[in-house]
Image (cartoon, helix red, strand yellow):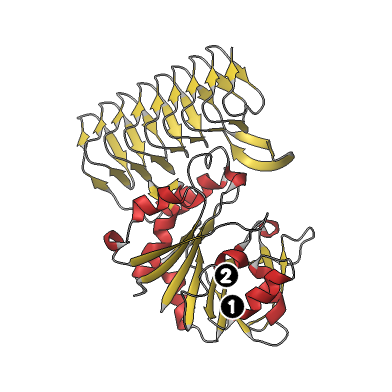
Amino acid sequence: MKAVILAAGEGTRLRPFTNSEPKPMIPIANRPILEYGIDALAKNGITDITMVVGYRKERIMSHFEDGSDWKVKIHYVDQKKRVAHAGTAYALSMVSSEVQGDFLLLPGDNIISPGLIGNLLDSKGKYRLVVTESETPSKYGVVELSGDTVVNIVEKPETHISNLISTGIYKFSDEIFPVIDKVIKSGKYGLTSVLQTIIPTTKVTAVKTSKVWSDVVYPWDILTMNAVALRKCVSQTSGTVDKGVTLKGSVTIGKGSVIRSGTHIMGPVVIGEGCEIGPSVCIYPSTSIGNNVRIGPFTIVENSVLMNDVQLSSGSYISHSVIGEGTEINPQFCAVEAPADVKLEGEFKRVDRLGVLIGEKSVIGSQVSVDSGCIIGSNCRLASHSTVRTNIEDNTRVI
């Protein structure tokens, strides 16, 4: 069976982290999100993949190439936007000439476990949709069932219907494409509209799963997704660990990394290649540290994601935060987590626990503190002794 992966989205709600990186390439536990879906397919024997790409497509194509490193064969289709707001149905229509017979459809921006794909393959029905329980159903398409049959999908409902949501993972046949064409001609571009069209006359089987599935919608979802992915990591040390280092739980240390004396690491934690950490650093659970990261002495990092090439100087404290690639943070930086109302796209979103979100290649001066829930854009410059109490746009200088 063939699989189709939709990986063309821009991910505007994830800015500043998608300014130069497509959403499916955001690192989670030091792996692009897209790798999890490809791995799940390969482990279920599905190796023929057509991938729809668009925004920053070169980043995806140069990383995966023909797919041979993942033991799959990938063919790319470029989604060339011909409409203002191209949705998932429009993206899927791009591969109508590439697909014959039955196929699986996956989003490229979800963590998907092999067991979930196994559930989908083991179920019955011409059309199938994987559904799961969510604590935040208003972010998704909420599914209404009669037995195991989907009877309605309500996209991002304003009032509570149920906690059962669509994962966007389907089993279809090529007979879906004429329906997609009809829906697009009516001015609708999402798969929810396609499902609403076929539900009255065609059985769509709901495949309930409790297997690992995680989605990233907003920047702080990176932290939740990262914590989920780290649960599956196992300890592995390829770098150098000095005497006097304490490692507890699942800790992975990449090739060429050095952990200096007096450092305490409590897993699950993943540390990439070529890093230098310590001496006397504390790293607490649910933290991912990318490649070529430097963390100076007497610094604490917990439940955070530090992407590649981050420089975090001495005496700093970072909690429940995401730090973009190539960012330089000077000594005594402080980002404490707390409940926060985060301003995003002109609206405030309530987040239970959040520190700071910093885009790529920003430079933060010494003794800077940031209020919980602030977003600092890419390529920003913050002078020493600054206090940040609101969002900072890309390319801003704070003096």
Which mark, residue 177? 1
Of the 4 image quadrants, the one containing the C terminus is top right
- Give amino acid for label 1: Phe
71 versus 298 height, above or below? below
Quick one: which residue is furthest to the right in this view? 159
- In the picture, residue 357 is in which quadrant? top right
In this view, 338 is above or below 7: above
In which quadrant is the N terminus drawn?
Answer: bottom left
Q: Position of residue 272 (x, y in %)?
A: 31, 40
Q: Nearer the viewer, residue 337 or 126?
A: 126
Badge 2 density bin: few <14, some 14–19, many ≥20, Cα 10 Å = some
- Identity of the residue drawn at 57% across and 64% down: 91
376 versus 5 height, above or below: above
The answer to whether mark 1 and mark 2 are in CB contact below 8 A is yes
Q: Amino acid at mark 2?
A: Ser
Q: Give neighbour class at mark 1: few <14, some 14-19, many 20+ (Cα, 10 Å).
A: many
In the rendered image, which quarter is residue 373 located in? top right
332 w.r.t. 138: above or below:
above
Residue 28 x %, y % = 43, 48
> How far separated are the C-alphas under marks 1 and 2?
7 Å
Q: Position of residue 132 (x, y in %)?
A: 58, 68
Residue at (35% x, 43% y) in the render: 270
Secondary structure under tag 2 reads helix
Residue 243 appearing in the image: yes
Expressed as whole percent of the image width and height from the top left, the position of residue 264 reads 33, 32
Query: The residue tagged with tag 1: helix, strand or loop?
Result: helix
Q: Which mark is residue 129?
A: none
Residue indicated by mark 2: 93
Query: Is residue 151 toward the left or the right of residue 270 in the image?
Result: right
Residue 258 in the figure: left or right of residue 308: left
The foreground one among 264 and 393 is: 393
Residue located 33% across and 24% down the image: 280
